[in-house]
Image (spheres, rainbow, N blue to C red):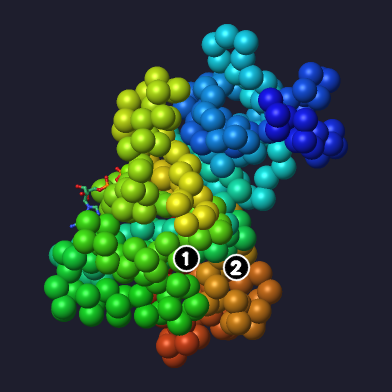
Amino acid sequence: MRKKKNRPKPAAPTVANAAGTAEKQAREGLVIARHGAHATIEDKEGRLHECITRRNSGPIVCGDRVLWHPARTGYGVVVAHLPRRALLSRPDPRGRPRPLCANVDHLVIVNAPSPAAQPPLNLDLLDRYLVAAELNGIQALILVNKIDEADEALQAALRAALDCYRAMDYPCLFTSAVKGTGMAALQTRLGGHTSVLVGESGVGKSSLIKALLPDLDIRVGAISAVSGKGRHTTTTTTLYHLPGGGDLIDSPGVRDFALWHVDAAALAHGFRDFRPWATQCRFRNCRHAGEAGCAVAAAAAQGSIHPRRLTSYRRILATLGQ
Ligand SMILES: Nc1nc2c(ncn2[C@@H]2O[C@H](COP(=O)(O)OP(=O)(O)OP(=O)(O)O)[C@@H](O)[C@H]2O)c(=O)[nH]1
Ligand SMILES: [Mg+2]
Ligand SMILES: [Zn+2]
């Protein structure tokens, strides 16, 4: 109660979706997890509260700053979310866009080596996440986990596959969540920001969180206790505070990440390596899909753009609007 007095009241115009005047007494909180119509809210003192979300509050997602009312008994109520820096969405199993998390600065795209594949990484999925990061103004970090499972030759192949991304100034990290390799470098990268781990199921996102958070079990236990859900947090997108500063969001793995609501021009803009060339195409509305005088295709032909990136772009382009 002592701190309540000092807490600045949110000014009405900054409150998105605020309904009615009851919001005046509302407190500010952070959405730690969202599950169905419920959300786990962390208050300013770090205590967790299980809340229901109002229908008219709009989508409330992990990482949202919200206004909420504590409960006299039972559940608290989330009444509105505060303005967001970024809202990251991805399709649900039926292909409908679903907001995943808000206010993230970094998208950590986690991959694991696939020794039998050529290249030994899921670069198509990586390219799609990179476009999402570019279009949302979020920084991307490319992470290859399970490096302990890769022999020398495979590690060389992984480095080669990522060469063109490093040349585009995307940071690339190799880690082993089980052996601890690269974890200090990862911690340094994540400090002071809010980041979200994305990638296919089983690449080790939750294991990375466990490696970074020594007291994770206590935290998971606390979240489970208020939400009444089990300990398998990977079905629910959940935010964790890192001991060295910064927040890290764990999300359930998905096999695919489709880009929708994006047109050809936006998609091309999401390919950072195309930008110096895309303005030099003969036609201003060039889709870089085989048109005459395409400077992007010419750059790919002479090696200034990695040919695989153009193939990847065209593959995504063919799926837009589907
Ligand atoms: N060898 C090795 N195994 C790992 C590493 N990281 C994770 N694993 C194993 O990979 C399996 C999947 O790890 P999770 O952390 O659950 O993967 P996830 O990405 O969270 O998966 P979803 O929650 O389904 O999206 C587990 O059996 C882990 O022990 C690693 O660095 N090296
Ligand atoms: Mg997981
Ligand atoms: Zn072009």
Which numbered circle lies on residue 99? Answer: none
Q: Is residue 306 above or below residue 18?
A: below
- From the viewer's perspective, is 281 left or right of 125? right
- From the viewer's perspective, is 153 left or right of 310? left
Q: Earlier in the sequence, mark 2 or mark 1?
A: 1
Residue 199, image x, y percentages: 37, 52
Residue at image position (71%, 38%) is 82
The residue under label 2 is which amino acid type?
Answer: His
Which numbered circle lies on residue 269? Answer: 2
The residue under label 1 is which amino acid type?
Answer: Arg
How crowded is the residue under tag 1: few (<14 C-alpha within 10 Å), some, or many (20+)?
A: some
Residue 18, image x, y percentages: 77, 28
Quadrant position of residue 291:
bottom right
- From the viewer's perspective, is 150 left or right of 258? left
Q: In front: 279, or 282? A: 279
Q: Is residue 145 above or below residue 278?
A: above
Secondary-structure class at tag 2:
helix
Q: Which residue is mark 1?
A: 189
Q: Is residue 207 above or below residue 133?
A: above
Secondary-structure class at tag 1:
helix
